Image: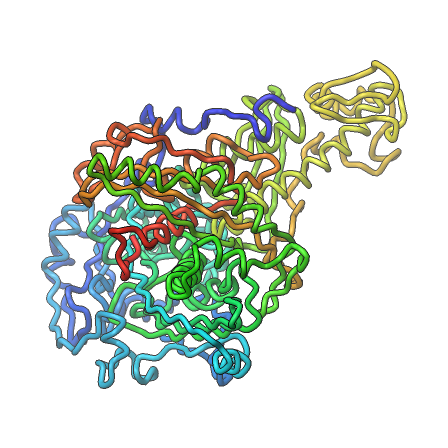
Amino acid sequence: MQKFGIGQPVRRVEDVRFITGQGTFTSDINLPDQAMSFMLRSPHGHARIKSIDTSAAVAAPGVLAVITGADLVADDIGTMPCIAVVIENSDGTPIKQPPHPLIASDVVRFVGDGVAFVVAETVNQAKNASELIDIDWEELPAAGTLKGAMADGAPQIWDDAPGNLCFDWDMGDKDVVAAAFDAATHVTKVELIHNRVVPHTMETRAALGEFSEEEDRYILRTSTQGTSSVQMVVGDMILKVGADKVRVMTPDVGGGFGMKNFTYPEQALVCYAAKKIGRPVKWTGDRSEAFQSDAQGRDWITHAEMAFDENNRITGFRVKNDVSLGAYLSQFAPFIPSLASGRILGGVYKIPAIHYQCVGYFANAVPVDAYRGAGRPEAAYIVERTIEKAARELGLKSDEIRRINFIPTTDMPYEHPFGFVFDSGDYKRNLDDAMKNADWAGFEARRSESEARGKKRGIGMAYYVECTIGGSESEGEIRFLEDDHVEIYMGSMASGQGHETAWAQVVSEQLGVPFENIKLIQGDSDKIANGFGTAGSSSLYLSAGAFKETSDVVVDKGKLVASLMLESEKDDVDFNEGLFTVRGTNRTVGILEVAARARRVDELPVDPITQHGLDVPRIGLNAEPGRRIDGPTGRRGDLIRLDEPQPHGPIRRREQPQEAFAIAIFPPNDFLLPPVPLIDSNELIEHGLNIPRQIARPPRPMFRRYPIHMPTADNIADTILLSGVKNSNPPDWGVASRCVHGRRTPFAKRRLRLP
């Protein structure tokens, strides 16, 4: 195995610059003669703009422009699109898609809706000028909550959406499920609240736009989870100049959680304003704005029912979710609570009949979109809370009810009632491994020992199944430089996941190039032709798969050059751990030497173009973009790969809710080889459970100021253990912790809210 290749523990290379203050985030970038900007936002949840007078603001010191919704309409600037309208109503009619203007011109529909974009020499001048804008408001009745928007006689948010209904969608055979419930010997019912959450990334959103007269295009520097989508939306849909007329550059990103996957009004506005005033324009949101304008998550109310026969087998499952979409449809909003969540309802259990209804409502609130798992954690939460309650009602143990209802290995590949295919899974073995590792049988003795010390101890388990989503393809490019370093290009974008380390390990393993010689290039639409970005837990299988295919091209070209150098036939050359070897001999040559020779074609014995049709002279061993790998959600649509779930437990908690709690997690090791052990093992727990691992540093001073209690490494007594995970996702660890909190411990609550 290559040193620091796949599966080898290595410290994250990117952390050196981050902990020494050398990171470069969007707000760190300043251009000559740049102006600053500020978005004036609505203080009302619902109000009509009867008039707006910007004259005093325009005349204020330092002000360069005041942009209103009317200005954008006059210049034919587009609106914010919803690009994932992949569902329709159950009756076949289209869902409601109201326009989402960059700046409201007639009616504001949530607190934080933009009403004017002020550009000035300094941000304080822009803020001062915004206070001079005179707006005549007519306040309107508002429905700020999901229940308020659903209520009879609720305030109407959009004229063409009666009852604030955006869509009423379902999947599954409703009649078959109804028959299963009619024949059931037991029915378990639960109502669950998935409360609205704010992503609140460490780095707030920011954008710096300029217009290059020389290149006749816009250049946008902004914090994203991938440049391609922002380039398309800003260039094609909003500015209407074409994506090729917008270059998007993303430097270091301080957290995304799904929220930075989307395009926001400010990203287009800084470009629009930059061309308008002939100077670069910068906008940086503050933390208050983040709560008012960043796409939020969840806000669902779930009603779930599970039917059982006399043998305690599940015969039917039906779920109805009422979901808030906020005032407008964000880019992927309809997809998240419907298909993204619905397709894994049922989890790892053999349920012959499932029906899922999802009803979406507009509300006078910030738009909602993908957040940390994007519907899949919520689905796992629904399934596990329901089956846990059923276990209590049926008098079964937590593992017993699961063993009865697992999809058996003999049924693999197993077709889910919704048509998706599980390709593999041995869920009883996973459960056995987890319970053994957690010493489940010894729990009662540990509980007694804790109670003797005046402490409470609980235990529980939760199963999840992960259906990763994201783009259908990805591209990986590999370039050999003259100094023996290698640049690798990928359309994913790290926001804390450690891609610079992980992708270097993948390429080092494939090509035998020293790990320290490999540098990841990301976040520039000029350099990366295509890439979905980082979303839906898709980066590992898409990006690593793309680099594997690209590496195969490099090796194939390398065998040709090596055969010419070693005076052999290409088919007689083998490649292993960075060395090309003539089979059956001791004649070898390293890949970096081959790459150097490939750049000097005149030194090769024959012309590789005329003899082999291979374009070595122009690009050496480099493999250009175009090596792609279909993802599980690829266009064919014939297979959704569902990775194996993980049972978890136990959890131990102190009586005082304000104290830090220690937790131990024991998922089974179903990785053949963890690709990046230090990241997989430590960071997933740290981020998913929102507690630092034992070796972590306490939160930095900035986060210590937050009114949020967060346990730190210095007051957690117990080590967090991990034996391995498979394509795990931080939200799934959160699901585990939330489900465990709902177990039948002496202090467990029957109604919970998600963290």
Q: Is residue 378 visible?
A: no
In the figure, residue 579 lies in which quadrant? top right
- 105 vs 749, nearest the viewer: 749
The furthest residue to the top: 586
Q: Is residue 261 left or right of 177 when viewed as pictured?
A: left
Q: Is residue 41 left or right of 189 when viewed as pictured?
A: left
Q: Is residue 536 left or right of 591 when viewed as pictured?
A: left
- 89 vs 657, nearest the viewer: 657
Residue 24 lies, in percent from the top left, at: 36, 33
Q: Is residue 426 left or right of 94 when viewed as pictured?
A: right
Above or below 711: residue 748: below
- 435 vs 668, nearest the viewer: 435
Residue at x 63% of width, y 23% of height: 2
Residue at x 63% of width, y 43% of height: 546
In the figure, residue 74 lies in which quadrant? bottom left
Above or below 750: residue 614: above
Residue at x 14% of width, y 68% of height: 53
